[in-house]
Amino acid sequence: MAAFVELYMDQGATFSNIITLTDDTTNTAINIVGYSVRSAMRRSYYSVNASANIVCTITDGPNGSITMSLAAANTANINPNRYLFDVESTTPGGVKSRVLEGFITVTPSVTR
C-alpha cells in the first residue's frame, strides 16, 4: 500500500519535493536503480486530463531517493485548489507499484 502525504505547491514558484522509498519491515532504503518513476496530479479521480505531470527523477537510486519537481512557469498555470496526486514506480522487469499518494494544495500567488 502506498504511503499518504499532503504537499503544498506555491503557484508561480518552483516546486521540489524529495521522497525516499523504504522497506516497511526493515525501514531500510529500497534500491531503485534501473526503475522508472512518474507522477501526475488531477482535480479528481475522474478527471480526464491531468492538471500537471510532475517530473520525477531518481536522484539516488541505491538509497531510494526520488525528486518530484515542476518549474515555476508550470506551477503558474495551475489554478489554486486542492488536487490528488500519486507517484508510480516501474521495476526493470515491468512491475508497477503506487509508492506515494495524497493531496497537493496549490496556494495562490499574489505577486505576478
Image (cartoon, rainbow, N blue to C red):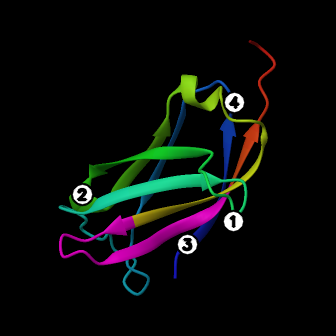
Q: Amino acid at mark 4?
A: Gln
Q: Is residue 18 left or right of residue 51?
A: left
- CA gap between label 2 and label 1 equals 32 Å
Where residue 53 appears, x then y in whole percent?
A: 50, 46
Q: Secondary structure at mark 1?
A: loop
Which quadrant is home to the C terminus?
A: top right
Residue sitting farthest toward the bottom: 25
Q: Taking 23 as reference, is 40 above or below it? A: above
Q: Taking 99 as reference, is 1 above or below it? A: below
Where residue 30 appears, x then y in whole percent?
A: 30, 71
Q: Which residue is mark 1?
A: 46
Where residue 100 appears, x then y in whole percent?
A: 52, 66
Q: Is residue 104 left or right of residue 109?
A: left
- CA gap between label 1 and label 4 equals 23 Å
Q: Which mark is residue 11?
A: 4
Q: Nearer the viewer, residue 60 or 104?
A: 104
Mark 1 vs mark 4: which is more N-terminal?
A: 4
Look at 37% across and 53% down and name the residue there.
Answer: 66
Q: Taking 78 as reference, is 29 above or below it? A: below
Instruction: Give the extent of the magenta segment.
Output: 89-103
Q: Which residue is mark 3?
A: 3
Look at 52% across and 75% down and name the residue there.
Answer: 2
Q: State which mark lies toward you, 2 or 1.
A: 1
Q: Does the stretch in magenta take in 105?
A: no
- CA gap between label 3 and label 4 equals 25 Å
Q: Residues within 10 Å of mark 2 (few under 14, many from 20)?
A: some
Q: Which residue is mark 2?
A: 61
Look at 35% across and 55% down and name the residue there.
Answer: 65
Mark 1 vs mark 3: which is more N-terminal?
A: 3
- CA gap between label 4 and label 2 equals 30 Å
Circles 4 and 2: CB distance less than 8 Å?
A: no
